[in-house]
Image: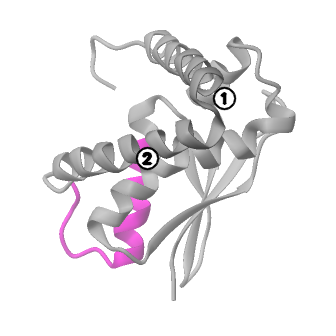
Amino acid sequence: MPPCMSAEGVRRGYTLLTLYIIEVIKDLGTQPSLDKLMEAADKQGALIAKEMKKQIPTGLTPLETGAEIYSRFMKDTGAEVSVHKKDDVSITFVVRRCPFHEAFLEVGVDCGIFLKGLCSNLTLPAIQATLNQFNPRLRVENIVARQSAEEVCLERVYLSE
């Protein structure tokens, strides 16, 4: 995280974004709002990939590249992530501290009920759009969504067939 940006500042930014998205959904409806969010995520993915291509070490396998992108993306947001499980076909990360989750809680979203859907529609598309810029077979998915602030999420990066 840049020295001028605090974890609290990042969380506040996500809180504002979450509130904005809620208002847009109220005005436009769920699907049109999510469609616009996917368009924005695709554009963001291209911008982030351009930045990361200068930082990602050369010589990595496609799966290692995907894991490096996921890890950097999440850590740059202020999340606390580490490798949970690694095998030949996937790398699963455990997400402990997550500013997206904190922002959802702050605006009153019951994450125990809605978080998997929120992650699928709000955070993972931006990561997926970035992965697509490196290899169209790279995928990210949520395996376990936390039910409370004390729990963790598990997210898996893998190569599709």
Task: Tell me if residue 130 comes above or below residue 101 in the rendering.
Answer: below
Binning the other alpha carbons within 10 Å of mark 2 as few (below 14), some (14 to 19) or many (20 upward) gives many
* Residue situated in front as seen by the camera: 142 or 85: 142
Label 1, label 2: how many angstroms apart (C-alpha)? 16 Å
Q: Say which mark, if any, is on residue 34.
A: none
Q: Which residue is mark 1?
A: 101
* Residue situated in front as seen by the camera: 96 or 99: 99
Residue 147 makes an appearance in the image: no
Position of residue 127 measured from the top left corner of the image (x, y, whole percent): 44, 51
Position of residue 103 measured from the top left corner of the image (x, y, whole percent): 62, 19
Magenta stretch: helix, strand or loop mostly: helix
Q: Amino acid at mark 1?
A: His
In the image, 112: left or right of 161?
Answer: right
Q: Is residue 48 magenta?
A: no
Residue 140 makes an appearance in the image: yes
Position of residue 150 measured from the top left corner of the image (x, y, whole percent): 81, 29
Snapshot quadrant of residue 141: bottom right
Q: Amino acid at mark 2?
A: Ala
Q: What residue is shown at x 65% (from left), y 22% (from top)?
A: 26
- Considering every residue shown, the one lying at the far bottom of the view is 161
* Residue situated in front as seen by the camera: 5 or 39: 39
Q: Which residue is mark 2?
A: 126
Position of residue 35 measured from the top left corner of the image (x, y, whole percent): 50, 46
* Residue situated in front as seen by the camera: 50 or 109: 109
In the image, 118: left or right of 139?
Answer: right
Q: Nearer the viewer, mark 1 or mark 2?
A: 2
Q: What residue is shown at x 34% (from left), y 55% (from top)?
A: 130
> Which of marks 2 and 1 precedes in the sequence?
1
Label 2: element kind: helix
Give the residues drawn in magenta, as a range. Answer: 55-73
Task: Tell me if residue 135 comes above or below residue 13 in the rendering.
Answer: below
Label 1: element kind: helix
